[in-house]
Image (cartoon, rainbow, N blue to C red):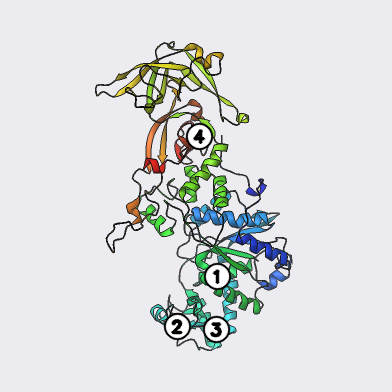
Amino acid sequence: MSTPDKDNIENKDIAAPATNFVRNIIDADLAAGKFAQRRWSGQPGLGAQQLGGALDPAKIRTRFPPEPNGYLHFGHAKSICLNFGLARDYGGRCHLRFDDTNPEKEDKEYVDSIIDAVHWLGFSWEKDGESNLYHASNYFDWMAKCADYLIESGHAYVDSQSADEMRASRGTLTQAGTDSPFRKRSVEENKDLFRRMKAGEFPDGAHILRAKIDMASPNINLRDPAIYRIRHATHHNTGDKWCVYPMYTFAHPIEDALENITHSICTLEFADQRPFYDWLLDHLAEGGLLQRPVPQQIEFSRLNLTYVVLSKRKLIQLVEEKHVSGWDDPRLPTLVGARRRGYTPDGFHLFAERIGVSKADSLIDYVLFEDCMRDVLNESAERRVAVLDPLKLIIDNYPEGQSEECVVHNHPFKPEMGTRIMPFSRELWIEREDFMEVPSKGFRRLFPGNMARLRHGYVVECTGCDKDENGNVVAVHCTYLPDTKSGTPGADSVKVKGNLHWVSVADACPAEVRLYDRLFSVPAPGSRREGDPEGFEHSFIDDINPDSVQVITAQLEPALKEAKQEDRFQFERHGYFVADRVDSKDGAPVFNRTVTLKDSWGKAK
């Protein structure tokens, strides 16, 4: 039985990765020896601490730096596979860093979920006795020293304008900003004000620390960006120690440098921030606070996928408005939802490999993601029989009370996966769609007078059916040909075109099965439609697929009764299913459909 991948991905045989522009940059840096003289003290720290260490044993250092204010989604999986994969392939290290510099939105629940997700995907931040799991909030003292240095060197000042006044003076894309009236404060006044800010003397919003760069810069991000603000809030990690907190654009470059990161890989929306990233690290290295060479920021395109939303705001809305059952709803593109749906870590690795890394934004068809999961599950998932819409088949000439065993392979192409026993008896469950009293053209399964094979069993001939008072078929009758059992010399004595799967009524395991489909019914939820009146806007909520989940009671072969949470199977003819990791109990599994056997979305819809 298949289980979640618990082996560290570094222990697997990895095919040679496809080249991309990020790998080209790393190859060039390594060839030039750019980072060969970096020193590493074994822990994050300022330049003096690092310079006292030995040469860094890691050829490169990357990082995955989530903010712990929500659950990870498919886009994060791409970043995890990229950053940890690069470190693996180049003999480096990848750090897991919680970017927890915002005290108002973060929670330990999210920290725990992120750790679980990275482990589930098969990666680790521990190697050769080195553990690289960090919290940015543990760097607050160093960040404050960096801010103090910028003030002392004349590169930062305390601004006392209101937020509206700062916004008005910032300018536009075509108009330069104007200097703050507080920009010429003396170094001593700025030092005193910042000290008092840290001491808690001022209310939120009274002052803000800004970098002093160029209010006329064509890049708005260089127009004296804010680097520290006052926030009287309890932090989940540091408690009430701080009442000033660094802005993300200030904290993030420093975090990278403190951790000796060589290649800081982020998504394209941070490209406009790269000049400030470089400005800040260059000035801090100039002052001796950081060692050189400083980290290099590289941007790549984020994941855009049809039929899903990856916006944190929209995901929160789906959960809070109860359009889904929670963050681990199998229809959500969260990693906790993906795991519960039955998607596999190897499927995510394959998907990341196939979509590649580029600087060009593109929309990836969800079919590609599903195909990756199918390809992985086709290799790893044992086969089982499930009848999702049961109809009773009675073999009138089979002895009552008799049963026999049919030996069935667990995987048609992998004999090493072994076999199992399926009991065969007089009464069987078959799919309702496998019988038609009046057959349509080309129908090859059961109808009066027609013969079909019961897989692994006998050839049967349909003789009729029973109906209830409303004319609904409640049972189908047939006779079997005793000399035609599969695997015996007479199996080929009768040629039939129909082939049915079945489960013995006496031995069947009734179970709840959830047939999950795509959460949204259109490729771009919330997008404008042809024919919409001018100014009309769709809500992505309007595009929720009303048929995204169907809950049924199916009849399963007896071997499935022993399925454990997260065991994955191919239900023959129907698709790939997983035993739910929350609701399945010993002897009473609940199954979720992961993906159908082939893409049927266009035809079905």
* Tag nearer the camera, 3 or 2: 2
* Tag nearer the camera, 1 or 4: 4
Q: How many marks?
A: 4
Q: Nearer the viewer, residue 93 or 476?
A: 476
Q: Amino acid at mark 1?
A: Ala
Quadrant of the rendered image containing residue 526? bottom left
The circle drawn on residue 177 is 2
Label 1: which residue?
251
Are discs 1 and 2 less than 8 Å apart at CB?
no
The circle drawn on residue 570 is 4
Q: Amino acid at mark 2?
A: Gly
Q: Residues within 10 Å of mark 1 (few under 14, many from 20)?
A: many
Are discs 3 and 4 less than 8 Å apart at CB?
no
Relative image position of residue 176 (x, y in whole percent)? 45, 83
SS for callout 4: strand
Relative image position of residue 19 (x, y in whole percent)? 63, 56
SS for callout 1: helix
N-term-proximal mark, 1 vs 2: 2
Give how far apart the Cα atoms at labels 3 and 4 are.
Answer: 66 Å
**From where the camera sits, is residue 50 visible?**
yes
Give how far apart the Cα atoms at labels 1 and 2 are.
Answer: 24 Å
N-term-proximal mark, 1 vs 4: 1
N-term-proximal mark, 2 vs 4: 2
- Which residue occupies 58% across, 65% down? 298
SS for callout 2: loop
Label 3: which residue?
191
Q: Give above or below for 56 relative to 434.
A: below
Q: Amino acid at mark 3?
A: Lys
